[in-house]
Image (cartoon, grey):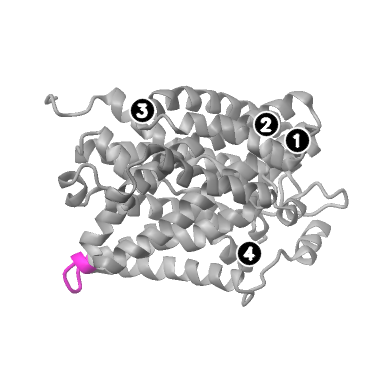
Amino acid sequence: MTPSTPSLGKVITTALIVTGNMVGAGILALPINIGPAGFLPAVCGALGVWALMTCTGLIIARQPFLSQNKDADLPSFFEVVLGPVGKWVSVAANLVIFYGLLTAYLAGVASVLVESLGVAVPGWAALAGYFCVATLLASFGDVVLRKSNAFFMTVMWLLFGALVLMVLPHYKGGDLLAADMRLFASGLPILVVAFNFHNVVPTLCRVLDHDRKSITRAIWLGSGLGMAMTLIWTVAVMATLPMESSTGIDILTAFKDNVPATVPLDQLIRSPLFSKVSIGFAVVAMTTSYMATGVALLSFLKDVGGSYLRSRVLTWLLAFVPPLAVGVLYPNIFLEALNVVGGLGVGTLFGILPGLLLIRQGAPGSRRRLAGWFVLVFFSFVLLVEMGQELGMLNISPDAEYWNSIKMR
């Protein structure tokens, strides 16, 4: 090992930053948002989107610009490789991602605390209280993030294992071949955001001294761990919660109520221990992602602001006050925020732009260029689906009658 090569321990702790950034609101929302599409579409879609998102992350990480300009972030990168339009598209998409994710984490934790814990405070008060703690942790920067992330990930894995073990006795199974592909299309933005870690790519490149081999290992390891947890959790929830029921404790009701998967599971299992563990898992999972996203947002604002944004206090206010304000005004925005983040933000910044990058860098007829066109077409479709839903041109909702007919067979 050469002196400049990062140690295995450093690669692993950096990989956990990727996992921590992935395993947050997305893992809690995915079974509810993609569940109405059916078991096979949810599982196959998750595996396919994970592989594609990991590859687009590697595309960005392997660009020479990041190693040659070690303090640069994504806007500067896209400006150099795709021109001024690339920069401002990335800035707009980044703002959607950062503020949307932070808002979703705040709203998600608040809904878990109020719905599952039954705290006698308004949703906005629970959100504000969590904001103070999570934002304090995110304010310390990437050094503290890397060192504390291993602890948070260990706690999260223990809680995750306990959750899965407590859910298994309530396994109900279901029709594995039943599928509603209309809902699969509408759930693509959530799939995209569930496997998003790309905003921390510049940070992990810096942490690993821009060593290409170490970065590749960290990304595959970190995203692989996140994918495994997401897939296990999705299968466990879909095999436990009914798709539709007269009690209202089901996937379709949770979809309509805009709540994480732990809320209906807590109502179904009705165990004080499960309630505590599910709350702990949801809070820790979203806190690790909140920290990673917050650190990345601070770096992003410094990169975009340049000489105009030298005040640390002003940077902090610009980073964290907007999501707090939106969360307080719209405390039930959890799933909606994630859909917007996935379809408009992540799909554009970490799908369409890397696709254009491959097309531009690939020779005519080369595999690189063909891969770029595939990535571009897929994420353009995700963008169009989300825009159609937000503009009211597509009104896709779960087909309760279809799932009722499946249940009656």
Q: What secondary structure is marked by label 4?
A: helix
State the image coordinates of residue 47 (x, y, percent, origin top left). 47, 51
Q: Which residue is mark 4?
A: 183
Q: What secondary structure is marked by label 1?
A: helix
Q: Amino acid at mark 2?
A: Ile
Q: Amino acid at mark 1?
A: Ser
Q: Which residue is mark 2?
A: 279
**Distance of label 4 from label 1 (alpha carbons):** 27 Å
State the image coordinates of residue 394 (x, y, percent, origin top left). 62, 74
Q: Who comes first in sequence, dot 4 or dot 1?
A: 1
Q: Residues within 10 Å of mark 3 (few under 14, many from 20)?
A: many
**Distance of label 4 from label 2 (alpha carbons):** 28 Å
Which residue does the image show at 50% across and 57% down from the upper left?
342
Q: Give the answer, above or below, for where 352 lies relative to 2.
A: below
Residue 6: quarter of image = top left
Q: Is residue 195 left or right of residue 106?
A: left
**Distance of label 4 from label 3 (alpha carbons):** 37 Å
Which residue does the image show at 24% across and 35% down from the upper left?
214
Whether residue 48 appears in this view of the structure is no
Q: Which residue is mark 3?
A: 13
Q: Main secondary structure of the magenta part?
A: loop
Residue placed furthest toward the bottom: 393
Q: Which residue is mark 1?
A: 116
Residue 370: quarter of image = bottom left
State the image coordinates of residue 1 (x, y, percent, origin top left). 14, 24
Q: Who comes first in sequence, dot 4 or dot 3?
A: 3
Q: Is residue 118 left or right of residue 12?
A: right
Q: Give the answer, above or below, for where 359 lies relative to 55.
A: below
Highlighted range, magenta: 360-367
Q: Give the answer, above or below, for where 36 lies relative to 73.
A: below
